[in-house]
Image (cartoon, grey):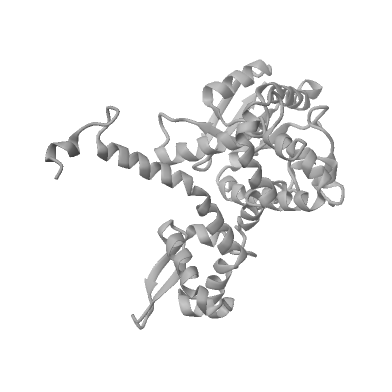
Amino acid sequence: MASSSSSSRSINGRKASEIFQGQALLYKHIYAFIDSMCLKCIVELDIPNIIHNHGKPIPLPELVSILKVPETKFDNLGRIMRYMSHNGFFVIVKTQEETEEAYALTAASELLVKGSDLCLAPMVECVLDPTLSGSYHQLKKWIYEEDLTLFGVSLGSHFYEFLNNNPDYNSSFNEAMASDSHMIHLALRDCNFVFEGVESIVDVGGGTGITAKTICDAFPKLKCIVFDRPQVVENLSGSNNLTYVGGDMFQSIPKAEAVLLKYILHNWTDKDCIKILKKCKEAISSDGKKGKVILLDMVINENKDDQRLTQIKLLMDVTMACLNGRERTEEEWSKLFTQAGFQDYKISPLTGLLSLIEIYP
């Protein structure tokens, strides 16, 4: 029998308890892809909509009946539901009869109800598409390539070139971005001060115009231009104060009093961001007037944000690195603004992840 002192003996300078914690962390990351695949599974099975349409928490037997799951897989679906409940996507409650457990939606799974005003299911479907998510198996190869993006390594072209050449993926990506724009509307609801007094605005990379339409509804006298790749806007129709223009933001941006860049600059290198910001500065500085550029983007702040929020921001930073982009700290943002010729900026909180940054020439 080992002596009691052996359990406290260090291995490589670490206690056994510390090594076991390390093992648990390692296994958590080894199997982290299961989180994404379970999320994809409940979206593909339309489980959030089934519970929503049920009108009350649904017991597992009713769920498997609706889904027509083979009896041999009842337990397997139950395991997935239990795991996703543990992760915050469902709440397990007792039925009114107190005879069995049932599953209810949470704030997270409500965002997966298709057809609702705030639905991020298209984001799940786009990001977890095997062609795109499979690219991350090439991280090692990408690290050794001097200039290629991750998708350049795995798909043979930059991500946006891939979208241009693959209409189905382009459509999926546009739907994902549109779903995210609905979330931004919720955040902008209390930010009317940003647009008050502005007579014209260009939403660069504005997609199908969801954010622009929200702004136009709130400010009917505001002239709004949605500016995006020609493939995105070519079949879209505007209205009295909303127009669509196709083009390349690296060449020129339509002139306006304000330029909106929502989730744009994190896609690009510092060098490219400076080019884009300079084009923005040209667009808002015509006729001797000086407007402003409005950014909706992340600001990494490890000293003030809690650990969980910082983890998500740093995770997104790795994701954007694969596009040769990045998430930035305030110091990194400030440096970009100065190099692009801007004199001042103001950062306001918007959501837990996003900040609103106003930049002045």
Q: Is residue 214 left or right of residue 76?
A: right
Answer whether residue 114 is visible to the viewer in this image: yes
Q: Is residue 191 left or right of residue 292?
A: left
Residue 98 location, x and y as percent?
Answer: 33, 80
Residue 231 location, x and y as percent?
Answer: 84, 45
Q: Is residue 158 left or right of residue 104?
A: right
What residue sits 74% from the left and 48% below the top?
209
Q: Is residue 28 above or below residue 320?
A: below
Q: Nearer the viewer, residue 201 or 279?
A: 279
Q: Quadrant of the N terminus?
A: top left
Q: Nearer the viewer, residue 145 or 290?
A: 145
Displayed quadrant of residue 96: bottom left
Q: Is residue 138 left or right of residue 39?
A: right
Q: Is residue 82 above or below residue 15?
A: below
Answer whether residue 202 is visible to the viewer in this image: no
Residue 163 location, x and y as percent?
Answer: 78, 44
Q: Is residue 48 above or below residue 130?
A: below
Q: Nearer the viewer, residue 95 or 185?
A: 95
What residue sits 58% from the left and 24% below the top?
333
